[in-house]
Image (tube, grey):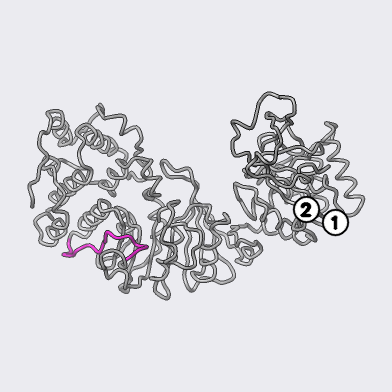
Amino acid sequence: MRTNVVQNVSNATIRNWAKLNTDGIGRLTSRANKRNSQKRIIPMEYVSHSENIAFVQRILDLIDEQELNISSVILSLGISLLKRSRLYEKDHVLSVLEMYKEIPVYPELETINIPHNEFDILGLIYQSYIQEGKKNAIGSYYTPLKIVSNMTNAFRFTKNETFLDPCCGSGAFLLSVTAENPNQIYGVDNDETAVMIAKINLLMKYNTFEFIPQVYCLDYLLGYSHLQQCDVFEKFFTYIATNPPWGAIDNTSELVTPITSGETFSSFFVKSHGQLEKNGIIRFLLPESVLNVKVHKDIRQFILKVAKLKSITTYDDTFSGVTTKYVDITCCENADAEKFDVFAGDTRRSVYTSSIFETENFVFNILSEEDVSIIQAVKKKGSYSLKHSVWALGIVTGDNKRKLSKEYQAGMEPIYTGKEIQPFLLKPANNYIFFNRDELQQVAKEEIYRSKEKLVYKFISNKLVFAYDSNSSLFLNSANILIPDIPYMSIKTVMAFLNSSLFQFMYLKLFGELKVLKGNLMELPFPEISESENIKLTEMVDSILQNKETNIEMINEYIFSIYGLSEKQKNYVRSTVYGKVSK
């Protein structure tokens, strides 16, 4: 083994190494460089024993104080683990370490007492070291251990089954599977340090085997066509499971023809599925947005038509440093074509696959029986849509700071933003503008803005919020414009439906977007109503616009009555939309 050692180690470092060598770490007194460490987060969901957090933090402080190389630190600590397990002198272990002969080591770290009860102490240190900005940029966050366990606990290894994690990181999924022989396990990742950790972890777990871990530092999407050749790309696997990078843009999507979105996790799924055995199982952890956001229509189509959806598991927790919720999706060739399972905590329910095809973008609705009964009741009465209506975007000025004013000047007129839109009514405008089409970047036809009646709605919103304008007002692009064309309905009646709790429910369940999109709105089914019903709803809206006694709940009740919903169904809609049940 090489003896490269960083010179000029300070006394403070030596003292810290001495502290690390003790079994009782005691209370941490940090001298860390805060410019570096303040942007780091120890992922608590990846910690298996909380008493080891102080050890991890002390290592991070040591790295900061002495500006140590993270790969060298990880390798040195890995050698310590291997020595303690009496594996260090074995030929197959030395062969693995020879692959990293160019990385200097710190002999002092090779002898410290590392916590032996942590699931992946090296991976925990490495993930804690990487700054949040870099994690976000590359979409790299390690998976909480309980989720890793949940995603792999059904994999059985009784007949030489094989497992692949194409984005293995430090090996959480590789360590979690119950294969008796390490030669049944394969991993790929493009992070050399993470791959090194995964190899050391497997050597530790399978300490009675003489083997070289089948974990490769490669770009899985590019594969051997651009990087070193590896037989992992020539194999098929019984099980494939991973947490792929999220949000990172995939510049190799042309290699995976079904994917048009450029999303990396979608490309990983499609390429991985190509290596799945005929009756194999593939299970991916994905952001919740994969269920309904329009841009992910491509991967939903692939899952439905090629991979065959078996189940979706939802989770309530989030990762440290990540606010996005997530789901895991399981597919296999022998999945039930008519329905799939949805798991949430300890509950399991079946959802009919046909419900997905009720939306243009193949939204994975995860609808309950109650959801389906209400949606079908609304669709049964659906006779019309907004497809023949007039739509327009708000104005894009190209320079709001220069072209908008908080103070009125002669010749200006008010211009509204999404912030001023509330149900039915507009708040007073906070900005003024000189309306000169030639000086604006993007403008709709003026007759749309100047229409005697129009509806405007918030574009960025998780709920439908429509307001009425009869003053030929101008709007910025945070607001969109609709002049509806629904037979037998006034514009105010259409607004009553769009603002109702029932249509809020429909939009939430069918689409679940954080943006109110024209394409989704055009799928909402409007009923054929009588002249008296139209007059009644119009009068109720007028009462709200005139600040009279009518309230929105009265409109909700009237619309419920049009569909003949039961009290139980109405309360379910209210609890879904508002988080409470009306008494």
Left/right placement of residue 239 relative to residue 570 reads: left
Q: Is residue 409 left or right of residue 52?
A: right
**Which of the 4 image quadrants contains residue 201?**
bottom left
Q: Residue furthest right?
A: 532
Residue 32: x and y in percent read 26, 30
Residue extending furthest toward the bottom: 278
Q: Nearer the viewer, residue 61 or 520?
A: 520
Of residue 83 and residue 439, the one placed in the foreground of this image is 439
Q: Is residue 284 magenta?
A: no
Residue at horizontal 52 percent and vertical 53 percent from the top: 344
| Residue type, label 1 | Pro
Point out the tag, 2 or 1, that comes first from the N-terminus: 1
Mark 1, residue position: 487
Residue 575 appears in the rendering? no
* x and y percentages locating residue 556 in the rendered image: 78, 44
Q: Which element is circle 1 on?
A: loop
Q: Which residues are magenta?
A: 208-223
